[in-house]
Image (cartoon, coloured by chain):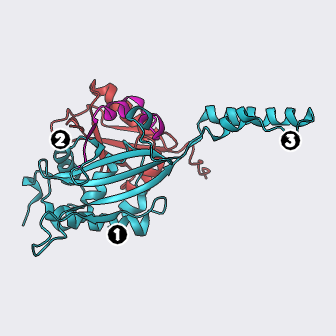
């Protein structure tokens, strides 16, 4: 029987979903360490899309702060074994 | 009945009030890190039938006093100095310099208002900060003090949209986070909500979702239990 890995090395499956007019990623699913901050997801997306102004949010009409831990987001908003993160390229601020 | 697909993400003044009250209630019952938001009525025409409709949410005198790394070092140094002074036998000598340094860490207070914008038809965050003697803080001082997120570029870009403007009800200069674009991302937030709520639910949750975005700029975090309580 495999021992349960501690949450610090546990990985979370993140599914990046394009909304609005945002470009769709070829590879939209990836794994990230639960102990990592949401900032890592944001930075990853920005590099992939070569865009700085991105708006990221999860399915409960909520935009997570970059300092939130991915594992916390998964535990609260994940379902079906993954965390769905929506993204749009609309300008967030005036 | 409003259908989300054709909704532009904005609210009427009346809906803002409903949403504001719902938000304040949720906050009071589930967010223990901060005091409650209070609805402040500002009737334009107090003689009309519904004078309570116009107003704003207020959360004031939030004390933000965080010791950063530099301050911790200073404190250590002060202790060392005192020890040396007492060892030298000058126990009664009050080192003015040491005292000044110790009191140098001022307490700063923040007032936050959520005000409805008639132009953009969305809520707008207004804030101001001041010392215990009432002396106002400038934007660059506020910027240094409010907790920024680890993503420096993100927090930096958001700060460029804070400007000083006259508070619509109090007629005094406050700092305001620009609201244009709010309708757009509010619509996105709800359009992609897996629960696909009816408009009444959207109204109940509107300020909460709005605050999850706007609160990040000023380091105010929404606890998850507020969002899960649906």
Quarter occupied by residue B52: bottom left
Q: Are discs 1 and 2 less than 8 Å apart at CB? A: no
Chain in red? A
Chain to which mark 3 belongs: B
Q: In the picture, which chain is cyan?
A: B
Q: Earlier in the sequence, mark 1 or mark 2?
A: 1
Q: Is disc 3 surrounded by few (<14), some (14 to 19) or many (20+) residues within 10 Å? A: few
x, y percent for residue B206: 24, 58
| Residue B90 % position (x, y) | 89, 36
Q: CA distance from mark 1 to mark 3?
A: 54 Å
Q: Which residue is mark 1?
A: B25
Task: Examine the rendering and report whether any part of residue B73 can be seen.
Answer: yes
Q: Quadrant of the C terminus of chain B?
A: bottom left
Rendered location of residue B153, percent (x, y): 37, 28
State which quadrant residue A17 falls in. top left
Image height check: is A54 above or below B119? above
Name the side, left or right, on which B37 lies relative to B84.
left
């Amino acid at each position: 029987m495999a021992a349960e890995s501690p949450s610090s090395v546990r990985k979370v499956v993140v599914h990046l979903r394009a909304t609005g007019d945002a470009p769709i990623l070829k590879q939209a699913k990836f794994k990230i360490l639960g102990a990592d901050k949401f900032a890592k997801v944001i930075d990853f997306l920005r590099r992939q899309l070569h865009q700085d102004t991105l708006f990221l949010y999860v399915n409960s009409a909520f935009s997570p702060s970059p300092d939130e831990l991915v594992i916390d987001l998964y535990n609260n908003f994940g379902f079906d074994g993954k965390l769905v993160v929506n993204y749009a390229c609309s300008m967030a601020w005036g | 009945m409003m259908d989300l697909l054709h909704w532009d993400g904005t609210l009427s003044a009346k809906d803002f009030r409903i949403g504001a009250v719902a938000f304040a209630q949720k906050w009071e019952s589930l967010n223990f890190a901060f005091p409650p938001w209070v609805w402040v009525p500002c009737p334009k025409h107090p003689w009309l039938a519904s004078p309570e409709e116009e107003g704003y949410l207020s959360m004031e005198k939030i004390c933000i006093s965080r010791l950063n790394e530099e301050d911790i070092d200073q404190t250590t140094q002060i202790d060392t100095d005192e020890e040396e002074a007492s060892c030298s036998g000058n126990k009664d000598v009050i080192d003015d310099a040491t005292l000044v340094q110790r009191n140098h860490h001022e307490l700063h207070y923040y007032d936050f208002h959520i005000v409805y914008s008639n132009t953009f038809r969305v809520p707008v965050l207004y804030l101001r900060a001041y010392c215990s003697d009432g002396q106002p803080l400038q934007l660059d001082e506020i910027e240094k003090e409010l907790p920024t997120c680890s993503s420096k570029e993100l927090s930096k870009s958001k700060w460029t949209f804070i400007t000083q403007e006259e508070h619509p009800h109090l007629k005094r200069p406050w700092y305001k986070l620009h609201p244009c674009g709010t309708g757009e991302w509010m619509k996105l937030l709800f359009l992609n909500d897996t629960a696909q709520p009816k408009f009444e639910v959207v109204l109940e949750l509107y300020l909460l979702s709005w605050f999850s975005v706007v609160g990040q700029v000023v380091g105010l975090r929404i606890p998850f239990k507020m969002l899960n309580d649906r």
